[in-house]
Image (cartoon, grey):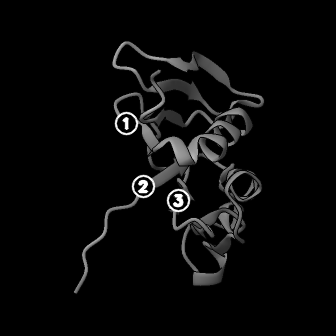
């Protein structure tokens, strides 16, 4: 058995929109299951996403869901999604950073960091925190 760890993103009611956006950034086709399909939750939450999944051509796996109104939804400021690679990945990582930043908030532009790599941080338009690191880019 191979154990894996993947982020499971929480949204109030934007999971479908967010995963469609992430598919436009990273590629792939998201899949969705709703609370209504499984007969759980309240009738007004039937169309909320109970599970979303995106497997990308580059091997990333994102999962998430809408939280029912009865569950608290705290801002996930203690967790960041980290994308990293080497100099051969610079174009891809820079493109992802720029795409994730659209409609979001860039906290640190993707630029040379004190440790020599290129590094940037942002919150995407759905409030998810991202860090991007391109290793080996120092002169």
Secondary structure at badge 3 equals strand
Q: Which residue is mark 3?
A: 64
- Cα distance, mark 2 to mark 1? 10 Å
Query: Which residue is at the far top?
Result: 114
Identify the residue at image location x=64%, y=33%.
124
Q: Are marks 3 and 2 in contact (CB under 8 Å)?
A: yes
Disc 2 is placed on an element classified as loop
Specify the farthest residue to the front.
139
Along the viewing direction, whichever of 47 and 6 lies nearer the viewer: 6
Label 1 sits on residue: 79
Disc 2 crowd rating (10 Å Cα; few below 14, some 14-19, many 20+) is: few
Separation of marks 3 and 2 at Cα, in angstroms: 8 Å
| Residue linked to disc 2 | 7
Q: Are marks 2 and 1 in contact (CB under 8 Å)?
A: yes
Residue 33, percent from left and from top: 63, 76
The residue that appears at 65% across and 21% down in the rendered structure is 105
């Amino acid at each position: 058995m191979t154990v894996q760890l993947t982020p499971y993103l929480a949204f109030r009611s934007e999971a479908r929109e967010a995963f469609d956006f992430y598919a436009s950034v990273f590629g792939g086709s998201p899949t969705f299951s709703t609370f209504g399909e499984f007969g759980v939750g309240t009738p007004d939450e039937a169309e909320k996403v109970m599970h979303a999944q995106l497997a990308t051509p580059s091997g990333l796996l994102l999962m998430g869901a809408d939280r029912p109104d009865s569950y608290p939804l705290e801002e996930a400021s203690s967790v960041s999604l980290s994308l990293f690679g080497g100099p051969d990945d610079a174009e891809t990582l820079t493109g992802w950073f720029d795409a994730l930043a659209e409609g979001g908030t860039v906290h640190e532009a993707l630029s040379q960091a004190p440790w020599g790599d290129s590094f940037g941080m942002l919150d995407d338009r759905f409030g998810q925190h991202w860090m991007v690191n391109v290793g080996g880019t120092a002169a």
